[in-house]
Image: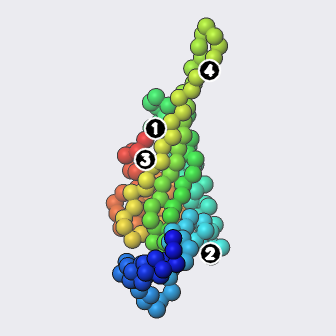
Amino acid sequence: MPATRIRSILPATLALLSCVAPAHSGEPAERGPVFVDASAYLRAEADIEAWFMLRRQLARNFDDICGDTFCEGEYTNIQALRYVCSVQRVTGRIGQCAWSFAASEESVDPRRGHITSDAPAWLCASPLEPRTTIEALLDALQGEEPLYATLPGSGRTLFDGLVDCL
């Protein structure tokens, strides 16, 4: 492309960009992720310990009830994998919390001896109210049975969320 043609389209290109590009407001742009994993958000040792204790207690609570509830049906070996929350790194508000599960049902081909498996996975969203903070969640779910504790600002529990999901 000749230099004269480049010079002739340059002003038009700059004018177009000035129309579509946002003006600098003088405030610093947000850098980095808006949401982080709860374990990356929490700083106080007590909060970090509360988070990991919550996750251990939830797994225990699920193991205690699985055989009498969710594990009576097609899949008798559902396993709780991980409970995770996304947290706004500036405000501490939760974007979403979810609990992952997996199971399997294996069968043996009696003629060939081959094993096949059906291995579903679920990601169960927690029924949290908007604007719930991670600190409020940790406070509400302390104790031996967080699966049945009432979630902040709601009449629901994490167990209710599992009933909707599994």
Camera-near label (4 vs 3) is 4
Residue lying at the far left in this picture: please name it.
Answer: 155
Pick out the residue farthest to the top: 111
Looking at the picture, tell me which residue is in the foreground, 90 or 78.
90
Q: Which residue is mark 1?
A: 70
Q: Is the Cβ of the residue at disc 1 closer than 8 Å to that at disc 3?
A: yes
Residue ID for mark 3: 162
157 vs 40, left or right, is left
* SS type, badge 1: helix
51 up-or-down from 78: above or below: below
On residue 115, the disc is: 4
Label 4 vs 1, first from the N-terminus: 1
The answer to which of marks 4 and 3 sits earlier in the sequence is: 4
Q: Secondary structure at mark 2?
A: loop
Say which mark, if any, is on residue 6: none
List x then y, in percent, for residue 111: 61, 7
